[in-house]
């Protein structure tokens, strides 16, 4: 049996739902047509019965007039006219008997009997008997009219009951069709959305750097095929991740080993192990030692940046106390703060927040290190945290030279340093703020510069979940 694709399954689902509703509508239309036909037939029969009863009443008058005229004039033509009128009523009586209503049939039989007895009496010249028989036609006509009205009333009541039954049945059918359509739509929607949700979870899994769980999608054939491609992508990303770790380890070893040897050699020269150095030689050795340290710091920053970028998407959110996290970051750099005579004030952060504390700690540490590097000795650094409109805002403000307007956007790019630098600030690698941006973006937030008249004001905004 061929497997259905997502599009074909969706199309078949729509067709099945439409078919259910169409069947309910068609059954309702057929029921309405049946009722209309029954109503038309009943109305036509009622009109016919009423006309026949009225015709018998008129013929009763004609019969009585002809009989009285015959009895007075004794004209045979008048008697023949009486017989002809009586014969004309026979089809009408047959129709009334054919209605199948006992009351109408009984009244019609009484009328027929009276008319027949009157005709027989006239043939035998029994005038009084004929008039007596004709006198019974009036009550028979009244009985026919009453029976006809009762039958019409019963027929109308039956039609109303039939209409109510049809309405109830149609309502049940429509509600049943709607319920069946909803259930069918829900079942098809669940069958289609379940693999879509699984695909979304698989993509989130890959984006989070979790490559150990196989991806298996069950559902429409095209979504299963997409699931197999995602699983292939998972394996490729796992291979690339392993290659990245291996390359970083290899580069770290290959660069740090000769660099350590170079620094050791420079240290031996400065210690004059190979002999005394002249002033110029000591100056050269100092330059070598300074640049070797700078190169080591650059290499470590580069490796840390790439490691941070690759690891940024692996979030481990949990509820943490913001104030405690801010205090930890300040305490970790207490020695640098004391060496420069800097003060740090912390405001807010009393509410807990759901976030990745390790990554936020690294981001705050880099911001604080940047503020320490650019603050004047004895200056103040302000840290604050507050929550407003579902957003966690963390501010870091220093009293340094600030950031030039033309550097406001570029300052967060890797290896970019601002043009405003204090004379006491050591040259950095320019990756600290880019690491902060990557870590904040991985948690769905952003970091930007807030314009200040003096100093640099960095603000991190992270989504806050209660």
Image (cartoon, rainbow, N blue to C red):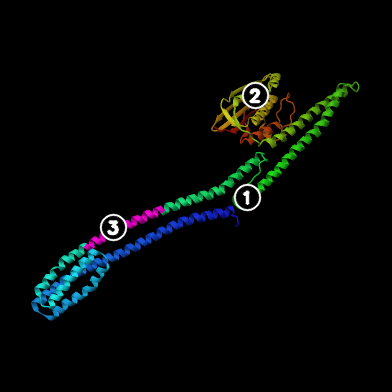
The numbered dot on residue 339 is none
Q: Nearer the viewer, mark 2 or mark 3?
A: 3
Q: Secondary structure at mark 3?
A: helix
Q: In the rendered image, which quarter is residue 3 located in?
A: bottom right
Q: Is residue 82 magenta?
A: no
The numbered dot on residue 224 is 1
Q: CA distance from mark 2 to mark 3?
A: 88 Å
Range of residues picked out in magenta: 147-172
Q: Residues within 10 Å of mark 1 (few under 14, many from 20)?
A: some
Q: Position of residue 16 (x, y in %)?
A: 50, 55
Q: Report the residue at 88% width, 24% height from top.
A: 281
N-term mark: 2 or 3: 3
Residue 308 or residue 384, whichever sits in front: 308
Q: Secondary structure at mark 1?
A: helix
N-term mark: 3 or 1: 3
Q: Position of residue 401 (x, y in %)?
A: 68, 26
Q: Position of residue 463 (x, y in %)?
A: 58, 34
N-term mark: 2 or 1: 1
Q: Secondary structure at mark 2?
A: helix
Reading the image, the residue beneath label 2 is: 328
Quadrant of the frame with the C terminus: top right
Residue 355 or residue 121, whichever sits in front: 121
Q: Are marks 2 and 3 in contact (CB under 8 Å)?
A: no
Q: CA distance from mark 2 to mark 1?
A: 48 Å
Q: Position of residue 371 (x, y in %)?
A: 67, 26
């Amino acid at each position: 049996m061929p497997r259905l694709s997502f599009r074909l399954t969706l199309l078949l689902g729509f067709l099945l739902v439409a078919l259910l509703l169409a069947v309910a509508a068609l059954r309702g239309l057929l029921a309405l047509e049946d009722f209309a036909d029954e109503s038309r037939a009943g109305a036509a029969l009622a009109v016919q019965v009423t006309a026949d009863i009225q015709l018998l009443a008129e013929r009763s008058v004609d019969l009585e007039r002809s009989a009285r005229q015959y009895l007075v004039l004794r004209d045979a033509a008048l008697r023949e006219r009486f017989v002809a009128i009586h014969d004309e009523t026979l089809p009408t009586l047959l129709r009334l008997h054919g209605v199948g209503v006992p009351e109408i049939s009984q009244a019609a039989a009484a009328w027929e009997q009276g008319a027949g007895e009157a005709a027989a009496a006239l043939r035998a010249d029994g005038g009084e008997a004929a008039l007596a028989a004709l006198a019974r036609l009036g009550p028979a006509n009244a009985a026919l009219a009453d029976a006809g009205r009762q039958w019409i009333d019963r027929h109308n009541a039956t039609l109303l009951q039939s209409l109510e039954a049809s309405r109830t049945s149609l309502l049940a059918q429509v509600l049943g069709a709607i319920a069946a359509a909803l259930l069918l739509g829900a079942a098809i929607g669940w069958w289609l959305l379940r693999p879509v949700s699984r695909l979304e979870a698989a993509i989130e899994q890959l984006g989070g750097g979790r490559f150990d769980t196989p991806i298996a999608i069950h559902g429409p054939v095209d979504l299963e095929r997409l699931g197999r491609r995602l699983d292939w992508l998972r394996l490729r990303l796992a291979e690339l991740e392993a290659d990245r770790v291996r390359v970083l380890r290899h580069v770290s070893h290959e660069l740090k080993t000769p660099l350590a040897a170079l620094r050791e050699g420079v240290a031996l020269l400065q210690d004059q192990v190979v002999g005394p150095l002249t002033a110029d030689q000591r100056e050269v050795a100092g330059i070598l030692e300074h640049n070797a340290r700078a190169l080591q710091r650059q290499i470590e920053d580069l490796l840390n940046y790439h490691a941070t970028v690759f690891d940024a998407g692996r979030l481990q959110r949990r509820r943490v106390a913001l104030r405690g996290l801010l205090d930890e970051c300040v305490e970790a750099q207490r020695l640098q703060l004391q060496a420069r005579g800097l003060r740090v004030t912390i405001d807010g952060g009393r509410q807990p927040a759901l976030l990745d504390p390790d990554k936020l700690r690294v981001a705050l540490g880099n911001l604080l290190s940047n503020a320490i590097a650019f603050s004047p000795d004895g200056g103040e650094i302000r840290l604050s945290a507050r929550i407003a409109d579902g957003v966690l805002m963390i501010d870091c403000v220093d009293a340094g030279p600030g950031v030039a307007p033309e550097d406001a956007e570029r300052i967060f790019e890797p290896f970019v340093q601002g043009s405003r630098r204090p004379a006491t600030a050591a040259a950095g690698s320019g990756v600290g703020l880019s690491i902060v941006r990557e870590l904040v973006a991985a948690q769905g937030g952003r970091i930007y510069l807030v314009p200040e008249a003096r100093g640099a004001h960095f603000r991190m905004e992270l989504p806050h979940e209660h």
